[in-house]
Amino acid sequence: MNMPIEMKPETLKTVAATMRALGAEARSAARLLALAPTEAKNAALVAAARELRANTAAIVAANALDLAAAAEARRPAAYLDRLMLDPKRIEGMAKGLEEVARLPDPVGAVIAQWTRPNGLKIERVRVPLGVVGIIYESRPNVTADAGALCLKAGNAAILRGGSDSHHSSRAIQLCLARGLSEAKLPETAIQLVPTTDREAVGLMLKGLDGAIDVIVPRGGKSLVGRVQEEARVPMFAHLEGICHTYVDRSADLAMAQALVVNAKMRRTGVCGATETLLVDTQAPAGMLKTLIAQLIEAGCEVRGDAAAQAADTRVKPATEQDWSTEYLDAIISVKTVDGVDGAMAHIRTYGSQHTDSILAQDQAAADRFLARLDSAIVLHNASTQFADGGEFGMGAEIGIATGRLHARGPVGVEQLTTFKYIVRGTGQARPG
């Protein structure tokens, strides 16, 4: 089998030439994938899942190289957690590929159809986007998720993982390539940029001579900022996850205790982790104190306003910057607000329109929050950690889009398609 190989620095052409070749190969593969039968795409995904399981030891070994380098660079614990792969997480990736294989194929689906008075029959039909460029940082699992979703939606993918996760991403991408080969689909349908040179990112943002149709950035504020500033092709904005949980005066205390800790501490390094806890000033006496104590006992550092500090002397003073910080760590900011409207005003000022939750037994308060807060995901009586394409039944996701055009919220297979119009006539000519 003609497997893709890692390019050594001395064998690389210029980065520009390498990236142009990558783009041309992806464009050719995209034309074939657009016509690929569902059975072939599903077979490739299932075969890739088998390869992930069979190569678990090799992936863990590759990941160990990345982890060692990150530890030497003194990356924080939350960063190492996002980077780390173990057999359980690799099994999760494999199951994710199989879940994507079981999803309905969006390509060719008729979204709408109607007949005009002149007899023309019109259909709006889903079609692939073409070539999707994904730029991501320390999460090597994105390699599998992004590759799988692009494949199912009939797109070719050019993946540019972070330099910190390059060995891990490469080991995963090789499994995807073997799955494609087994299903007799082009291996170049899912390619990993073979260099960590930052010039490659700039070239992708310029579109690789028209080869890339859309860019999806998944990472921190600096990465997304660069993409927004430099991109010459459309992008799905995945901004930082400054997520909020608001505890209303009507909230059930036991539910609030469980959900607040889960929303922050289940995994602190994911974009759906709550970064700010908002508590109604009219909440029952002791609720604020109880919630803060629960967080601290769970190992979370709490930074709060004057009311939060008064409730528990262990709370550190919050600064203005804390309200707009994505910690991705066991740190949370806590503020008291004047009811639902106060919570929404704070979120509109400091949030990133990613994911926000209200904990309330008062249905009117919940409905007001859900209807009037314009975040990509709003929840009632549920943890913000459900901001995940897999939890939405999408199998996986490339990211949570916080923009307003084309895709919003979890970006799954349907969001990785566009549409065209098919018009069938019987000889109609337009009158003069």
Image (tube, grey):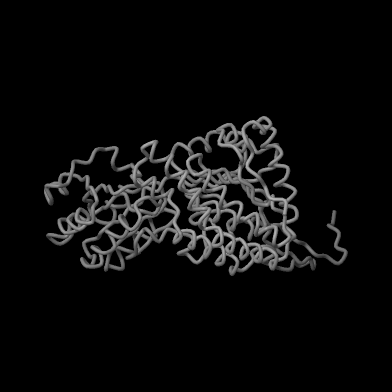
Residue 278 lies left or right of residue 272; in this view the side is: left
Front-most of residues 166 and 64? 64
Residue 164: image x %, image y %? 47, 41
Residue 10: image x %, image y %? 64, 31
Q: What residue occupies the far right of the structure in this picture?
A: 427
Residue at 79%, 66% in the rendered image? 118
- The quadrant in which residue 365 appears is bottom left
Task: Report the label total.
Answer: 0
Residue at 49%, 44% in the rendered image? 165
Residue 66: image x %, image y %? 46, 43
- The quadrant in which residue 202 appears is top right
Residue 65 lies left or right of residue 420; in this view the side is: left
Image quarter hosting the N terminus: bottom right
- Does residue 288 appear in the picture of this structure? yes
- The quadrant in which residue 359 appears is bottom left
Residue 143: image x %, image y %? 55, 51
Front-most of residues 125 and 56? 56
- Does residue 349 appear in the picture of this structure? no
Residue at 69%, 31% in the rendered image? 13
Front-most of residues 123 and 52? 52
